[in-house]
């Protein structure tokens, strides 16, 4: 017979903006071993503010911001949007975007374009190393975008993101529900990753990951879990579709998430609030009481 309680649970969840793609996922979140979160856009707002521009060599602050905005113009990454917005706010919307060609987005690294015969790279240390750029590593905290123009290091833009309002409460609620294994994965640098981990009292933080590394770590966590329990991954979806698909339960942020992520996910949180996951677990527990 069909367990009617599952349909009740799915209905109750959908009224709260939690779309569950099948009753089996409600049962699975009733039995959580570990919750693995992505950082940017999932636990943080994914809205970065530029907090510093540090030119190198003969470049000026204005040039650093302009070249970075040209490189980032065609990217949907939250980092890219913040750089373009900072350019618009400080230098006005005068970008010669019609002269940008050969845009390439390199997942977990950054972006590369051609502009009036020059090659611009904007991204992290991995991208600079890949392009054999002789760059100066930025030592202070924050998320960092390094810039290179025609093979020369041009400077550093420091940006920062904020925790979502409900991030801390989500971790407290999950612990209250007996879910203590809370992990975060990020492509961002160690310093920023570990700081967020401390702020949210997470068990483990893995940083400087490429999208493929995230799948590998998730697989390891799944191998180590208590049998019959599930490993949940919560992500905003930018580059995360393979991780969402690999998790026992993949949870996507519906507002920020890409179509691929929403497709790959088992549960979609329409309002992008991580606290909805704890609510979903609460609903799953009540549903279970009705079914059995
Ligand atoms: P996260 O794991 O935080 O969601 P991503 O996998 O999207 O991050 O990206 C990992 C890292 O790659 C970023 O922290 C950044 O250093 C770099 N990166 C990715 N896309 C861009 C971009 N468009 N511009 C600059 N840096 C980028
Ligand atoms: Mg992400």
Image (cartoon, rainbow, N blue to C red):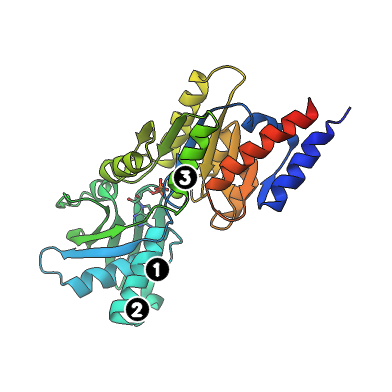
In space, the residues marked 1 and 2 are separated at their CA atoms by 9 Å
Q: Residue furthest front?
A: 176
Q: Can see residue 70?
A: no
Describe the element under mark 2 as helix, strand or loop: loop
Query: Are dots 1 and 2 in contact, CB under 8 Å?
Result: yes
Give SS at disc 1: loop
> Residue at the location (64% across, 30% down)?
30
Residue 167 horizontal/vertical position (percent) = 45, 47
Check disc 2 and report the residue beneath it: 95
235 over 88 or under it: above or below: above
Q: CA distance from mark 3 to mark 1?
A: 35 Å
Which residue is at a point 73% across and 46% down the rendered structure image? 12
Q: Quadrant of residue 97?
A: bottom left
Kindly identify which residue carries mark 3. 169
Q: Residue at x 35, y 63 (%)?
A: 113
Question: Residue 277, relative to residue 289: is it above or below?
Answer: below
First in residue order: circle 3 vs circle 1: 1
**Badge 1, how many Cα within 10 Å: few under 14, some, many 20+?**
many
Which numbered tag is attached to residue 73? Answer: 1
| Depth check, front residue: 63 or 129 | 63
Quarter holding residue 156: bottom left
């Amino acid at each position: 017979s069909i367990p009617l309680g599952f349909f009740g649970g799915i209905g109750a969840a959908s009224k709260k903006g939690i779309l569950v793609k099948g009753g089996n996922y409600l049962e699975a979140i009733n039995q959580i071993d570990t919750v693995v979160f992505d950082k940017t856009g999932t636990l943080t707002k994914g809205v970065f503010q530029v907090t510093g521009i540090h030119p190198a060599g003969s470049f000026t602050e204005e040039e650093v911001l302009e070249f970075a905005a040209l490189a980032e113009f065609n990217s949907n990454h939250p980092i890219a949007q913040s750089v373009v917005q900072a350019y618009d706010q400080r230098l006005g919307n005068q970008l010669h975007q019609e002269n940008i060609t050969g845009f390439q987005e390199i997942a977990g690294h950054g972006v590369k374009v051609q502009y009036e015969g020059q090659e611009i790279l904007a991204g992290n240390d991995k991208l600079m190393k890949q392009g054999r750029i002789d760059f100066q590593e930025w030592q202070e905290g924050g998320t960092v975008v390094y810039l290179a123009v025609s093979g020369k290091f041009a400077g550093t833009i420091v940006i920062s993101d904020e925790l979502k309002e409900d991030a801390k409460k989500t971790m407290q609620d999950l612990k209250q529900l007996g879910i203590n294994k809370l992990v975060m994965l990020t492509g961002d640098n160690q310093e920023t990753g570990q700081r967020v981990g401390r702020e949210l009292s997470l068990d483990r933080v893995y940083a400087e990951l490429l999208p493929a590394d995230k799948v590998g770590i998730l697989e390891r966590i799944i191998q180590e879990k208590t049998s019959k329990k599930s490993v949940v991954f919560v992500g905003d979806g930018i580059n995360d579709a393979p991780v969402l698909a690999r998790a026992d339960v993949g949870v996507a942020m519906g507002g920020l998430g890409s179509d691929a992520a929403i497709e790959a996910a088992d549960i979609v949180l329409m309002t992008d609030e991580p606290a909805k996951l704890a609510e979903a677990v609460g609903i799953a527990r009540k549903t279970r009481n009705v079914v059995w």
